[in-house]
Image (cartoon, rainbow, N blue to C red):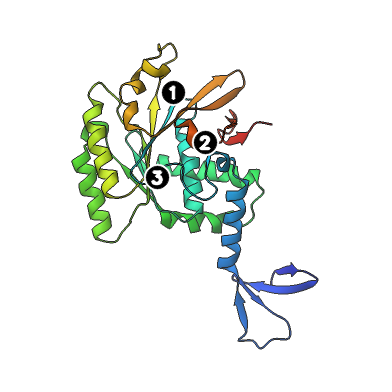
Amino acid sequence: MSPKITVGSCIYDVGEGKIRLPLQKPSEVIYIKERYFIMLKKDLILRNPLRVMGYENDDILNAGEFGAVLARAGVGKTAFLVQLSLNALLREKNVLHISLEDPVNKVSLWYQEVFNLIAEQYKVNQISQLWESLLPHRFIMTFKVEGFSIPKLEERLSDLMEQNIFVPQMMIVDGFPFDETVSDSLTEFKNLIKSHHMPTWFTMRTHRHEDPGPGGFPMRFSQISDLFEIAVQLLPDGKEIHVKAIKGAESFPEHLDLRLDPSTMLIKKRS
């Protein structure tokens, strides 16, 4: 027996993403699968607390701008970036995720786990089909830290785009080495993303007992803060993890108050 769907007071047969209206000719079939997923994606975007950060219509970052997520090890930097990425994927934006720490399968697992938690939280049906619809918009690229350079990234990026394999509209960079010599590399990196009109988010590890630098920023960030338009810091406080805007606060709503749920690492509004 084929599955049914109720629309208003009518019940229709559903098969393979199609609805066949009663009293219509067999050829008069309405394809609703694509429309259904568009509505489902919009619903998830509307429910997502990331909207509070400015994701209702446009990205917080403009093309060619840098954003950073700062936190101590294990506090949720990667999970936070994956949620930024998933929100872009739901809006059918192409996201290039670059990892300098983890292999492709581990990064992919991060996405799958975070997506499953979001789907469970919002009671999303047909999760497999929705997940499959997002994958063409994501490309994972990995490097070993010692083998990474901006010219090498530019070469691989050009290969993807020139062969029409993948044309990114947003970049995620996890594990970039923010050492003493990072300023020149970041300047070169920024010239690259400006030429490709991409906003780019980085993770940056801070330390528990690190003294603040100029401007009250964590010391490591204060030295290169002029290259970043936006920075948020994840701050553990008891059983909660606060999301605090430390640079570019004018881009956020005045009363931005987000948390990470420590059990799932999902972003949530303050209850």
Left or right of 193 in this view: 93: right
In the drawing, what numbered circle is on residue 73?
A: 1
Q: Which residue is mark 3?
A: 62
Of label 3 and label 1, which has the lower sequence position? 3
Above-or-below relation of 33 to 76: below
Above-or-below relation of 110 to 176: below
Residue 200, image quadrant: top left
Where residue 25 appears, x then y in whole percent?
66, 88
Label 3 – label 1 distance at C-alpha: 28 Å
Mark 3 or mark 1, whichever is nearer to me: 3
Is label 1 in a helix, a strand or a loop?
loop
Q: Which residue shows up at 55% across the image and 33% down it?
A: 265
Label 2 – label 3 distance at C-alpha: 14 Å
Indicate the quadrant containing the N terminus: top left, top right, bottom left or bottom right: bottom right
Residue type at mark 3? Answer: Asn
Q: Are marks 3 and 1 in contact (CB under 8 Å)?
A: no
Q: Which residue is mark 2?
A: 252
Q: Are marks 2 and 1 in contact (CB under 8 Å)?
A: no
Where residue 113 appears, x then y in whole percent?
53, 41
Residue type at mark 1? Answer: Ala
Q: Which residue shows up at 25% across the image and 27% down it?
A: 182
Left or right of 110 in this view: 239: right
Where residue 243 appears, x then y in whole percent?
53, 28
Is label 2 in a helix, a strand or a loop?
loop
